[in-house]
Amino acid sequence: MAGKSSSQDLSGRKIMGRREPRVVCYRDKSDLVVLREWFYNFDGHKDLRARAVKRVKALESRGKLPHALASTSWLTSILLSEESPSPPPDVVLQLSYCMAMVKFVNGLLDPFQQASFAIPLHQLAKNLGLPSFFVELRHTGTHESMPNIRILRQAAKDALNWLFDHYWSIIDFQFSPETRSLVETGLAQANGSEFTSPKEFENFVNSIRSHLSTYKKIRKQDLDNIIKYGNSTEIGVKYWNSIKSLRNLLTQNNKLVLDVLITRNYLISKRENGEKKKPNPNISTQIKIYTPLLEELGPHVKRELLTEIVSVIKNFKLSTISHSYKATKLYIENSKEESSLIEWIKYLVSELLQKESVNNGNSSIVQLLDDIVEEISALDARQQLEIISVLDAEIDKMKVEPQEKEEVKEKLNRSMQSLKLSIYEPPPSLDDLLSQSPVKPSPSDEDNNSKPSKKRKLDEKAIKKTYFLEPHDSWVPIPLGIAP
């Protein structure tokens, strides 16, 4: 990047100039934004990693690549080749992974090896925040036998995560002042959706609301009627078009879709456009309306919705709401709306447990419970206690092995006891407070109370007086240095 530098004119005076611009292989940092999303934002519906690798090869023809960009491309290319229908033999993959990891570590640490004497690579890695595991893997792959293919595969994934945390996620994007606030709040980087202006962000939110409102209007006509896929009636076409559109929007920015679903008048009853109705904490109607939608949006939506509800409540308590969310009213406003969301959490954890027991058996229930308890730890103790009580009741209903059921119940009971102690612990008594900080009577109090009460006399007798030097009857004061 260009920067100021000082030079001298013919008279010897210093003048300010500009350094020569640095030539890079990409047009501007918006190219890196696109590449980051292609490399890291992929799922079963959309995967542009192969396109990202081709784009990096094109950039390489223009000039030298940044090391982080090149390493991301190498590692992703090998992972894609292994995931292809006809992957290379294991030995080819091992060699490829080894070379990519060696280049990854060397390219990071070699520029810092500038001392007169060689600095240990572990020290350089520590200074850079690079896990020593990568240095050990580099040494093994260079000087010893090649590591196992599973170790190399996991190391490549860990390296990509490290590159994202230390390079891709902290690129200094140069956006216009209008959109800088979106970047600062993380909305511009959320799940691959880039908003170039507040208006674009608002239009995206309005699009989500439009499809949710269409779905809600159709479902409220008859809650017991389930419109099957392929229904060719006018209502059926509108219903499935709204679900299809919401599914597409979810792949673009799942966080924002879930936030609109949570905070606007959908999952919870909420005042809209000056309405006088009060929020109703009872969510039974909302559950009937939106359960079919949650089922159609994908298998992981309920788990993601649970996480996002906890985040919304946390932001409400801490008042950490971005101005973009405030402008589009993507937040809850009072404790009644918060109570409605707690009811949704109870419903979701119950659904998740039932689904886990049916699909994966008892082995994964313990892990799911641990995840849920950790997830809700951001809530108040009373709210946590309500949710864990629901978990405890669900475990009683499930057909679980007796020993495993006992372990789970014991763990939940410990959590509930701990929460109850924090909620119902009585305040310290007056005697406790006085024993911690005894109040000594002042001289004025002693003068006013020259006739002590019987209780005070008893207290004085009970107190054992302590002296630094024991008193003697024959003791006579004499100046220091004079013999008695």
Image (cartoon, rainbow, N blue to C red):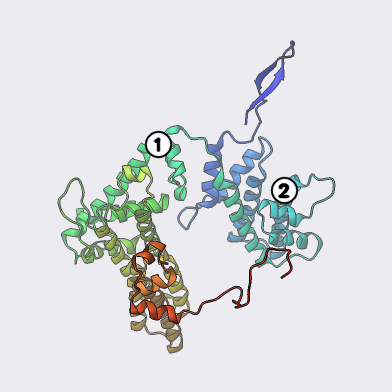
**Residue 100 appears in the figure:** no
The foreground one among 363 and 91 is 363
Count neighbours of disc 1 (C-alpha within 10 A) and say few if under 14, some if 14 to 19, many if 20 or more: some
Q: Helix, strand or loop at disc 1?
A: loop
Marks 2 and 1, Cα distance to the nearest angstrom?
A: 37 Å
Count neighbours of disc 2 (C-alpha within 10 A) and say few if under 14, some if 14 to 19, many if 20 or more: some
Q: Is residue 180 left or right of residue 380?
A: right
Asked if residue 428 is positioned above or below residue 197 in the image, the reply reads below
Q: Is residue 397 left or right of residue 133?
A: left
Question: What residue do we see at 37% from left, 48% from top?
Answer: 321
Asked if residue 11 is positioned above or below residue 266 in the image, the reply reads above
Question: What residue do we see at 43% from left, 78% from top?
Answer: 460
Farthest top residue? 11
Question: What residue do we see at 56% from left, 34% from top?
Answer: 28
Please state the horizontal and vertical placement of residue 410, each as a whole percent of the image.
Answer: 43, 83
> Residue beneath label 1, please?
197
> Residue beneath label 2, please?
107
**Quarter of the C terminus within the rendering:** bottom right
Please state the horizontal and vertical placement of residue 377, each as a whole percent of the image.
Answer: 42, 66
Farthest bottom residue? 402
Going from N to C along the chain, the mark reached first, 2 or 1, is: 2
**Quarter of the N terminus within the rendering:** top right
Please state the horizontal and vertical placement of residue 76, each as a whole percent of the image.
Answer: 61, 53
Please state the horizontal and vertical placement of residue 272, each as a whole percent of the image.
Answer: 21, 49
**Residue 256 appears in the figure:** yes
**Contact between labelled residues 1 and 2, with CB atoms less than 8 Å apart:** no
Q: Amino acid at mark 2?
A: Gly
Question: What residue do we see at 71% from left, 62% from top?
Answer: 94
Q: Helix, strand or loop at disc 2?
A: helix
